[in-house]
Each structure stands twice: as C-alpha cells, then as structure tokens.
C-alpha cells in the first residue's frame, strides 16, 4: 500500500482495516461477502473490519434486505473527517485544562509529587533563604546557627526584615551559642517558641534543617563551599516535622523565655 497505507495507519487504521477500506473504494458499496473475496479474508473477519471502519467514520452502513451494505467515504471526505477530529481534539484539550486541578488533587492525595533541588556556594545558599520568604507560613528550624559571614549578613539584613512583615510565626531548636543569642536579640519576635540545646560533642549539628509546607531544606552554611538540598515531598516534610515535635518535648531541649 506504500504511502497511502502509511497515511491510513497514521489515521488509526490497522493494516487490514486499510486494505478493506481501499478494496471498498475500488468496489463501491458492497456487502462483506464481496469485499472478503477481494481482500482474501474470511467473510466474518472482513465484516468485523468493515464495522470498525464504520465506527471510525471511514464507511457508512445501510441495511438492504438481509445484508449490510458498506459504502466508503471518498478520499476528499477524509479532510472533513480530520477537521471533525481536530475540533473534537481541541474540545478535549479544553476539557483537560479545566479538569487538571481535579486531577492534581487526586495525584497529591495518593502520590505526592517529589522534587529535589541542589544549591552550592554562597549565592546558592542565599537563594535557599530567599525561597523561604515566598511563604507566609509557620517555619520550623533545627539549627547550629553557624553560618558563613556573607550568608549570616543576608539573613540579618534581608531575611529578618522581610520575615517580620509576615503574620506567621516560627519555631526553632538551636545550639546554644553567643552567635545564636545575638541573632535572637534582633529576630526573637519572629518566633513563638525557641529551644536551646547545649553545645556538646554528641549533639554537634553541622547543618541547618528548615521545614515548611511540603518542603525540607538541608543547609550546610559553614566554610567556603556551602551546599544545600531542597526536598519537596509531603511525606518527608511530615516526618521531619514529627521529629521536630519529638525533640521539642525532650528534656535535652530547654525552652527560651520570649519577650512579650
């Protein structure tokens, strides 16, 4: 069948359906028994393919006496068929666009979407801090509060002033240190709960963990090569928040009195 066969295949016709359609074009309106002889197939098989062609719009069927007579659409009518399919496809695309939020709700309930992003260098870690500013939601920190000076400056001069304009409060478990005390003197009103952990070798924290919404950030902010990982997955976020709450209620964490 060559190019015509390939074209008909692209229109969702099987090779046998294409052969039956071309035979019908050559023969004109015929019952399945006549077409079957032309394509050298059993009558029942030919009838099956003729019914499929009718369902796909490539033939018409009328009952004449006791036999079904099949008439092919003309090649010039294939354009009209394609136009109808195009209109139907455009309608389906619009329906899909309208239904995508509902589909997404189903996906988010049963298969949380995951995304992992990596950040490197001072600029990369400052970008991670900036990402947190996009969300006026409660944020939970587990931190050594030991940052590269440039990252610390970004936190004090950019993050803290912008976060103070938001309504949501934060909570933090932080290693007790002079740098943490100095930070909280300026940023303590961002929090509705703060807990200190004594700085001991067995409790030494090298990284900062930030938990909010469905996101968890792991940030190593010391040295000349800071790096960070952002995981966007509700299972990880819920688990890390549960760990935060368990730590919060252990005797190793001493609550810090907040100024009223």
Image (spheres, grey):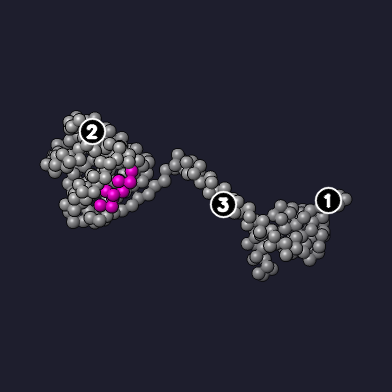
Quadrant of the image containing the N terminus: bottom right
Task: Return the residue at label 3.
Answer: 93
Measured along the vertical axis of the image, is residue 77 above or below residue 117? below
Mark positioned earlier in the residue sequence (3 or 2): 3
**Residue 169: image x %, image y %?**
28, 36
Query: Which quadrant holds residue 54?
Result: bottom right
Task: Return the residue at label 1.
Answer: 63
- Mark 2 lies on a secondary structure that is strand
**Residue 252: image x %, image y %?**
18, 32
Label placed on residue 8? none
The residue at the point 14 percent across, 36 percent down is 198
Left or right: where does residue 152 sit relative to residue 27? left
The residue at the point 76 percent across, 60 percent down is 72
Q: Callout 2 environment at 10 Å: few (<14), some (14 to 19), or many (20+)?
A: some
Q: Callout 3 environment at 10 Å: few (<14), some (14 to 19), or many (20+)?
A: few
Query: Which quadrant holds residue 53?
Result: bottom right
Nearest-to-viewer mark from 1 and 3 = 3
- Mark 1 lies on a secondary structure that is strand
The residue at the point 26 percent across, 37 percent down is 170
Magenta segment range? 125-135
Left or right: where does residue 24 sit relative to residue 214? right
Tell me, yes or no, whether the two marked residues, 3 and 2, touch with CB atoms within 8 Å. no
| Disc 1 from disc 3: Cα separation | 37 Å
Task: Return the residue at label 2.
Answer: 193
């Amino acid at each position: 069948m060559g190019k015509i066969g390939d074209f008909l295949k692209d229109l969702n016709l099987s090779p046998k359906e294409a052969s039956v359609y071309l035979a019908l074009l050559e023969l004109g309106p015929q019952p399945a028994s006549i077409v079957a002889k032309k394509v050298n197939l059993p009558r029942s098989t030919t009838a099956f393919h003729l019914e499929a062609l009718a369902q796909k719009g490539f033939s018409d069927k009328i009952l004449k006496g006791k036999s079904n007579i099949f008439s092919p659409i003309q090649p010039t009518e294939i354009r009209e068929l394609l136009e109808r399919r195009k209109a139907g496809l455009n309608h389906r695309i619009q329906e899909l666009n309208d239904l995508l939020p509902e589909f997404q709700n189903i996906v988010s309930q049963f298969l949380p979407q995951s995304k992992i992003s990596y950040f490197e260098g001072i600029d990369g870690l400052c970008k991670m801090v900036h990402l947190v500013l996009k969300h006026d939601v409660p944020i939970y920190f587990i931190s050594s509060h030991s940052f590269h000076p440039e990252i610390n400056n970004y936190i004090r001069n950019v993050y803290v002033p912008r976060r103070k304009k938001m309504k949501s409060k934060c909570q933090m478990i932080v290693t007790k240190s002079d740098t943490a005390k100095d930070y909280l003197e300026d940023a303590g009103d961002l929090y509705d709960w703060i807990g200190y952990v004594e700085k001991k070798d067995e409790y030494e924290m090298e990284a900062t963990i930030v938990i909010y919404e469905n996101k968890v950030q792991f940030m190593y902010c010391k040295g000349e090569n800071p790096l960070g990982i952002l995981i966007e997955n509700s299972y990880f976020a819920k688990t890390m928040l549960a760990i935060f709450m368990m730590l919060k209620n252990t005797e190793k964490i001493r609550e810090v009195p907040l100024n009223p």
